[in-house]
Image (cartoon, rainbow, N blue to C red):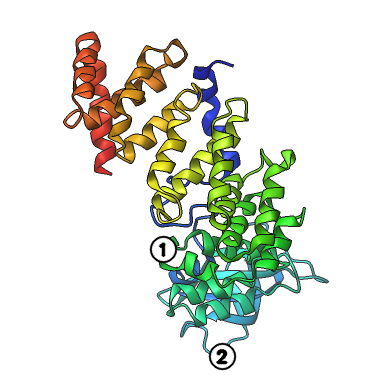
Amino acid sequence: MTATRFRFWLPGLLALLGSACLAAPAAACPFCGSQGETLTQAVNQASMVLYGTFKNGQLDNNTGKGSTELHIEAVIKKHDFLGDKKMVLVPRYIPTDKDKPPRYLVFCDVFKGNLDVYRGMPVSKDTSDIVLYLTGLLAIKEKDVASRLAFTFNYLDNADPDVAGDAFKEWGNADYDQAYRDVARTLPADKLARWLEDPNTPSYRLGTYASLLGHCGTEKHADLLRKLLDDPQRRLTSGIDGMLSGYVLLRPKEGYEYLLSIIKNPKKEFLYRYAALRALRFFWVYRPEVLPKMDLQKGVEALLDQGDIADLAIEDLRKWQCWDATERVLALADRPSHDVPIIRRAILRFALSCQDKQPRAAAFVKQMRQKDDEWVKDVEDVLKLDSAK
């Protein structure tokens, strides 16, 4: 497959690895692929939230209208409209099973004295902890984020997938510097290790668990991460960047050499090398004290010779303002292996960004303007838009 065709398919392939380090909001957890609205955020937007069973659904076949009784088992968020009611009539037909009525988490608005049920979330398990989880989380919502994360950690492996999934979203939305890293240091490492070894753990969670283990683990946990990384069956699963980063956190020197062994080998799977690149990004952006920045730059520069990933490496060097790499980057313009639009554009973006500081870059931009001034202007415009974000 040519580099051009490969990069055409790249967006879909990258999705297999979860969220990219820098694709999420700048401070969010870099290894959690589950950012999105949490249940507590949804509760905050509702006027009232109830938990209960739907019974006695009635449907008028002539008008298509109907009603269903909601028998309330718990009040997650109360409204004056409810008073002491143990049942409310929902003005729509909901199919019910007489012997096993469905349980729902129901989100409501109240407008001019009328109940508007706008969302019903079925609860998949009769033994669900969703009420305990939500009431507990709402009780500490005004506390610091660290308290919320410590609370939700205990629900990450909950039997109810809705509860476990929401707890994971709380971690995915957490600010890394504000709470994630500090809480991670206090977590039970052996429990995280068991989750990582469990074949039933969803693959999209492996990077998060491995990165957390990197914050709180010991030598034996470093051995576990290395074992997982060496397993060829794991290499194309999501979360490799988190595993690599967790390993480096526990063994900085050995971990960095391991990263380099991946990056320098163009025969490694693209997704494996890209995961190593994202691990380098993590340490540059979030943990610059762990590895020297020159080592991180050296790692990225090792990808410049590889045509299927060079543009990503060039873009990172540009964002990091590694202008001492100018000669290496511009020299790629003369390589047939790198003569594809996506790499040529990355080289020009790099040169445009440092032309005021690097005479060689200024000369390159001038040369490109003489060849195709319209193209250079287009790249400049996009670069300005990117810088304004």
Residue 248 relative to residue 199: left or right: left
Q: Secondary structure at mark 2?
A: loop
The percent coordinates of residue 377 (x first, y second) are 21, 22
Find disc 1 in the rendering and name its residue: 177
The percent coordinates of residue 84 (x first, y second) are 56, 90
Kindly identify which numbered label has been placed on residue 18. none
The percent coordinates of residue 143 (x first, y second) are 44, 80
Residue at point 54%, 75% (across, down):
49
Q: Marks 2 and 1, Cα distance to the nearest angstrom?
A: 44 Å
Q: Is residue 241 above or below residue 180?
A: above
**Label 2 with label 1: CB-CB less than 8 Å:** no
Residue at point 42%, 46% (across, down):
22
Of residues 143 and 273, the one drawn nearer to the viewer in this rendering: 273
In the image, farthest residue toward the front:
253
Of residues 255 and 101, the one drawn nearer to the viewer in this rendering: 255
Q: Is residue 213 above or below residue 316?
A: below
In the image, farthest residue toward the right:
99
Residue at point 66%, 38% (across, down):
236
Residue 163 found in image quarter: bottom right
Kindly identify which numbered label has been placed on residue 84. 2
Quarter of the image where the C terminus is located: top left
Of discs 2 and 1, which sits in the foreground?
Answer: 1
Q: What's under tag 1, amino acid-wise?
A: Asp
